[in-house]
Image (spheres, rainbow, N blue to C red):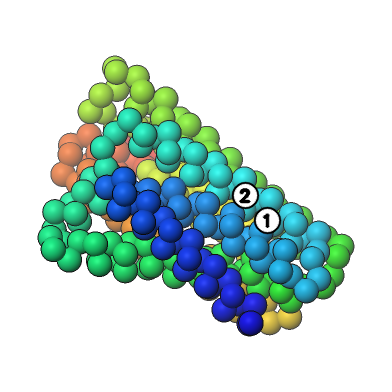
Amino acid sequence: MNYFLSLAIALFVYMTCWYLVAVRLKRNDIADIAWGLGFVLLSWISYVWSPTPTMAGLAVSVLVSVWGIRLASHIYVRNRKKGEDYRYLAWRKEWGRWFYLRSYVQIFMLQGILLYLVVFPVLYMNYYRTEQALSLLDITGFFVWLCGFIFESVSDWQLKRFIENPVNKRKIMTQGLWRLSRHPNYFGEVMQWWGIFLYAVAVPNGLVTIIGPVTITVLILFVSGVPLLERKYMGRADYEAYKKQTSIFFPLPPRAA
């Protein structure tokens, strides 16, 4: 069977299994945990199924695993003592009798499609790359990924500590990396996938894999990341003041009040 089709089928089965778990637990927000772990699964399957496994493929699979497991663990710990995330809870009420079908199609299957597009540079590189030695482009990709990982993990940790402090209840996080960007964790996530892309771009016709980092960039900047949070806090006086001083995405020094 075709390599890319086989990976798509594996992902379809994976997302369907998570959907069944979500139905059982009555929590569609476990799709957020499935997201990170799905990248880990597909990266390693593609590496094992690769015609010529390479050092670059191994390195990328490890990087994706570090990112995906950290993200899934972070979301699990954040949500385990809470009810279903407000976004999924709103859909549960809005979709009514079509809830189960729309959950399967619009949450789990759609997320699977997007996951496949984002991880495509890894799949493509594992299939077509034959060069064993790591190149300067690979090393550059690693450092881009590392900078992104630091940004995402540190900003998540800073936000977690801020929220856990009762003194900060109903306050806006404006410290640490959040002083440089209103969404430093999202910036870090996007940066990591551009780093992964650099591993694939040198493969013959590798520019086609730009669909991966472009997809995650568009998703976060214009669809499900930044816009949702910006709308959530829209109109709050403290957040409006924060917006005037702080870059929305790229880390920059705060503007004068």
Q: Can you tell which mark lies on residue 241?
A: none
Instruction: Name the residue rendered at 33%, 30% in the picture.
Output: 81
Quadrant housing residue 203: bottom right
Residue at the spot 59% in from the left edge and 54% down from the top edge: 40
Return the residue nearer the eye: 162 or 242. Answer: 162
Q: Which amino acid does label 2 sit on?
A: Ser
Q: Name the residue under label 1.
A: 61
Outermost residue, top side: 167
Q: Is residue 166 above or below residue 247?
A: above
Front one among 172 and 213: 213
* Residue at image mark 2: 65
Three-letter code for the amino acid on which mark 1 is drawn? Ser
| Circles 1, 2 touching at the beta carbon (< 8 Å) | yes
Residue 199 image offset from top left, x and y in percent: 70, 64
- Residue placed farthest to the right in the image? 133
Residue at 69 percent across and 50 percent down: it is 62
Give x and y (percent) for residue 164: 36, 23
